[in-house]
Image (cartoon, helix red, strand yellow):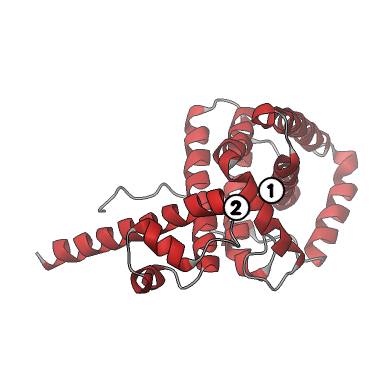
Amino acid sequence: MMLNMFNSKTRKGEETRARVQDAALALFREKGLDATTMRDVAAGAGLSLGAAYHYFPSKEAIVLGYYNTVQARHAEAVLEAVRTESTPRGRIAAAVHWKLDTLAGDRKVLGALLRFTGDPDHPLSFLGAGTRDIQLRSIATFAVPLESVDLPADFRRAAAVTLWALHMGILLYFLYDDSPGQARTHRLADGAIDLFLSAMRLLRFPPLRPLRTRLTRLLDEAGLLPDLAALPRPEPAPPPGA
């Protein structure tokens, strides 16, 4: 009985937290990040200001929650693609295009957040220390569709980071793409994926091993190659109430 009551309270808290985040994102899309106040968010979620602060102490915390939500959903989508797509290319394409499709309605919000990337100390910087855990989980997610790609063992870490960096570059182009449905970005993504896979095939050849070694060492010395074995492999989320 006590466990059921605890689970019920936990579920209710999670649902309220999600309601606050959804209300905030709707306001960010409508009014913009800067013009939206926490009082606006609380009203949009049907809560008192104090109750809204209980779940998120600031707008920055809401944005970080959004980053984490997108990452968790992306990991789920990639795991599903691994189950349903029969080719490595199909799995990688699903991973990249899912991000583009999911973030299509948030281009203005993400564009407003882009200004923080130039400040590595800002907690919302896409590449800063404040989002490092999300970056690592994203790299681990992009490593999943590469598990079925025939890659040299000494280059697997670099391949995962390269694919993650490629998707970040595509997302940057995506923010500026005014073509209908961001069609140019989707075409760019498909071409980039083909080039990535062609490069991976070329790098398997023994004569290119010194190049692989030099590139891996260069990235490692720059602190850009995480230990994939130390990163948690994405797992399906437990069912609600579990």
Q: Residue at x 70, y 64 (%)?
A: 116
The spot of residue 112 in percent (x, y) is 67, 56
Find residue 174 and report its image quarter.
top right
In the depicted view, which residue is nearer to us: 140 or 9? Answer: 9
Query: Secondary structure beneath disc 2?
Result: helix
Badge 2: how crowded within 10 Å, few (<14), some, or many (20+)? many
The spot of residue 136 in percent (x, y) is 61, 59
Q: Tell me the amino acid under the disc marked 2.
A: Ser
Query: Secondary structure beneath disc 1?
Result: helix
Q: Which residue is mark 2?
A: 138
The relative height of residue 195 versus residue 10 in the rendered view (above or below) is above
In the depicted view, which residue is nearer to us: 177 or 133? Answer: 177
In the depicted view, which residue is nearer to us: 124 or 128? Answer: 124
Q: Tell me the amino acid under the disc marked 1.
A: Trp
The relative height of residue 130 versus residue 142 in the rendered view (above or below) is below
The spot of residue 228 in percent (x, y) is 62, 56
Q: Which residue is mark 1?
A: 164
Find residue 8 and report its image quarter.
bottom left
Q: Disc 2 or 1, which lies upstream in sequence? A: 2
How many marks do you count on the picture?
2
The CA span between labels 2 and 1 is 7 Å
Q: Is residue 174 left or right of residue 72?
A: right
Please give the label number shown on residue 149: none
Verify CB contact (< 8 Å) between mark 2 and mark 1.
Answer: yes
Q: Residue at x 41, y 72 (%)?
A: 53
Q: Residue at x 55, y 56 (%)?
A: 67
Q: Is residue 143 left or right of residue 198?
A: left
The spot of residue 161 in percent (x, y) is 71, 51
Q: Quadrant of the N terminus?
A: bottom left
Badge 1: how crowded within 10 Å, few (<14), some, or many (20+)? many
Q: Is residue 27 visible?
A: yes
